[in-house]
Image (spheres, rainbow, N blue to C red):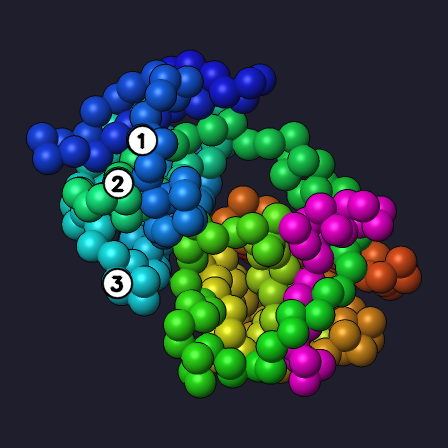
Amino acid sequence: MASLGERAAVFASLGAEGPVLADPRSAFLRPDDLGVLRGDGVFERFCVRSGRPRHLEEHLERMARSAEMVDLSIPPAAAWRDAVGLAAGAWAGPEEWEMRLVCTRGPEEGGPPTAYVLGQELAASVLRQRKEGVAVVTLERCLPSGAGEAAPWLLLGAKTLSYAPNMAARRWAESHGADDAIFVGTDGKIWEAETSAVVAAFGRRLVSPPPSVGILDSVSVKRLFAAAPAAGWEARREDLTVDDLFAADGVWLSSSLRFARVHTIDGKALVPAPAHGELAALAGAS
């Protein structure tokens, strides 16, 4: 295990003979790899705790769906499991860390896909936002809800490497004093944040937008909503608006790495979320 900058890291490539550990600082991608040239590929990202990847099977299933949407042949699930196990066994950093599974279309002139596993120490910003919460801005998505069904080539709902608009949204948010951005459709419906799903509480009812809006099917939300009824919560996938978020008893950004309370939207402070501790614990255990 080596480091990338100040963060501990571990790296394993997937090949025909099985996964191989390598120095995460070493050169690996070809300059003409389509993942670099065009963002042509898919990925998944999740936490590992005490050597155990969280919800690995759900992430493998979603990665397979994303690959099907972009017509990309990726290694079988068993190969990914082997690589994940190898990387987890080589990790010597903090007890909780993050792992990415990445597969690109490979060299521009053709050839096998480029597939690898990258593990890294959680970023300081993730740990801070878990504890302190986040301020967000709302940004127009410039598409109506349900556009993915009418235009499947937009790949709405696929987790691809083409994250330039998402990262541009984050930079825009940060330049306006916020941590994150929530996308809103042209019909006023809430979509998702740039790397997280949106969850709102109304009394003991949890609501998150449905994937049919045109968003990624969140593994963390599915897990949270599956665990919620036993804890006395009603959980529903329904449309939300910005006005709904301001009227809610709590708003959160949920992903595999963080369950962060939203304390400010477009510069306006939200009411304190009394259920934050309960839901954060439920999200962490689900």
Q: Nearer the viewer, residue 143 or 239?
A: 143
| Residue 138 in which image quadrant | bottom right
| Residue 6 in which image quadrant | top right
Where's residue 262, x and y in %? 75, 56
Is residue 95 placed above or below 285 in the rendered structure? above
Number of residues whose C-alpha sits closer than 10 Å to that of mark 1, classed few (under 14), some (14–19) or many (20 or more): few
Where's residue 123, x and y in %? 60, 32
Asked if labels 2 and 1 touch by Cβ distance under 8 angstroms, the answer is: yes
Give the magenta-colored segment's residue range: 168-190
- Residue 170 in the magenta stretch? The answer is yes
Does residue 201 appear in this view?
A: no
Mark 3 / mark 2, whichever is N-terminal: 3
Q: Secondary structure at mark 2?
A: loop
Identify residue for label 3. Answer: 71
Identify residue for label 1. Answer: 30
Is residue 48 placed above or below 215 in the rendered structure? above
Name the residue type under label 2. Pro
Identify residue for label 2. Answer: 107
- Residue 26 in the magenta stretch? The answer is no
